[in-house]
Structure formats: C-alpha cells, structure tokens
Amino acid sequence: QVQLVESGGGLVRAGGSLRLACDAPATIFSIFSIGDMAWYRQSPGKQRELVAGMTADGMRNYQDSVKGRFTISRDNPKGTAYLQMDSLKTEYKAVYYCNLKGHFHSFWGQGTQVIVSS
C-alpha cells in the first residue's frame, strides 16, 4: 500500500517552532498535484483531528486553535507538503499525520511525533 512519509517531528520547548514535511512517492505525483493535502494530529486518548488543509488550487483552512501559528504549504513538483508550526504550545503534543485526497484515493503516512515541553 502506498504511503506518504512524514518527517520533522521532535522535541521542542513551548514557544518554539518545528517544520513538518510530507513526501509523496513518485508513483503518486500525479495524484498529489491535483489532490487536497491536509495535516491531522492525534493525542493519546483522543480522536484524530484536522489541523490544516490546502486544496490543489491553494485554498487553505485551519483549525481555530492553530490559526496564526501554523502555516500549511505545498510544493507540487517535489510532491511535498509542509506544516510550519510556530509559537508551539504544550497542548499541541501529538502524532501528526499528513493526508492526500484524490478523486478516488486517500493516502496517509505513519505519522511523526511532536512533543512540546513546558
């Protein structure tokens, strides 16, 4: 099964920044260029929640709690999406997943852990 690959997670202090990346395999570049990208996160004991999304034509949306702190972007020729996370809070600690949604397919990665210490 084709999977996206997330990277960039780690341990950071509250107020710090991280930049997550999500790479699509070359076999699905054509889907990446026309699909909608999104970042989700899941904390222990909680459901996975949408953090940020970006359509193929550049429309962005964000969860209210991260507006002004997170920025989603994408580089279609590279098949990579990014999530720039600034002014991080301890409650943002979670596993972050990227998702690519095409017309007929939906792809996920295995996630990257983000830990924000106080």
Image (spheres, rainbow, N blue to C red):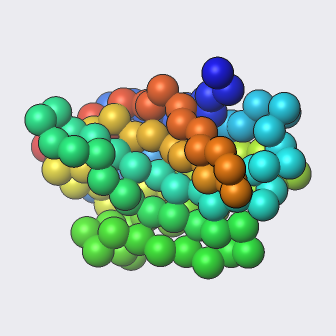
Q: Quadrant of the C terminus?
A: top left
Vertical relation: 112 (above or below) 67: above
Q: Position of residue 7 (x, y in %)?
A: 55, 32
Taking the spot 16% from the left edge, 42% from the top edge, the residue there is: 46
Q: Position of residue 28 (x, y in %)?
A: 80, 38
Taking the spot 36% from the left edge, 30% from the top edge, the residue there is: 113
Q: Position of residue 63 (x, y in %)?
A: 33, 69
Q: Quadrant of the N terminus?
A: top right
Relative to 74, 114 lies left or right: left
Front-most of residues 82 and 57: 57
Relative to 89, 63 lies left or right: right
Q: Is residue 66 visible?
A: yes
- Residue ranking furthest to the top: 1
- Residue ranking furthest to the front: 104
Taking the spot 68% from the left edge, 50% from the top edge, the residue there is: 104
Front-most of residues 5 and 67: 5
Instruction: Determine the image quadrant of residue 103.
Output: bottom right
Number of numbered discs present? 0
Vertical relation: 72 (above or below) 43: below
Taking the spot 55% from the left edge, 74% from the top edge, the residue there is: 60
Relative to 25, 84 lies left or right: left
Q: Is residue 86 visible?
A: no
Q: Position of residue 70 (x, y in %)?
A: 43, 64
Instruction: Determine the image quadrant of residue 24.
Output: top right
Front-most of residues 114 and 23: 23
Vertical relation: 86 (above or below) 57: above
Front-most of residues 65 and 89: 65
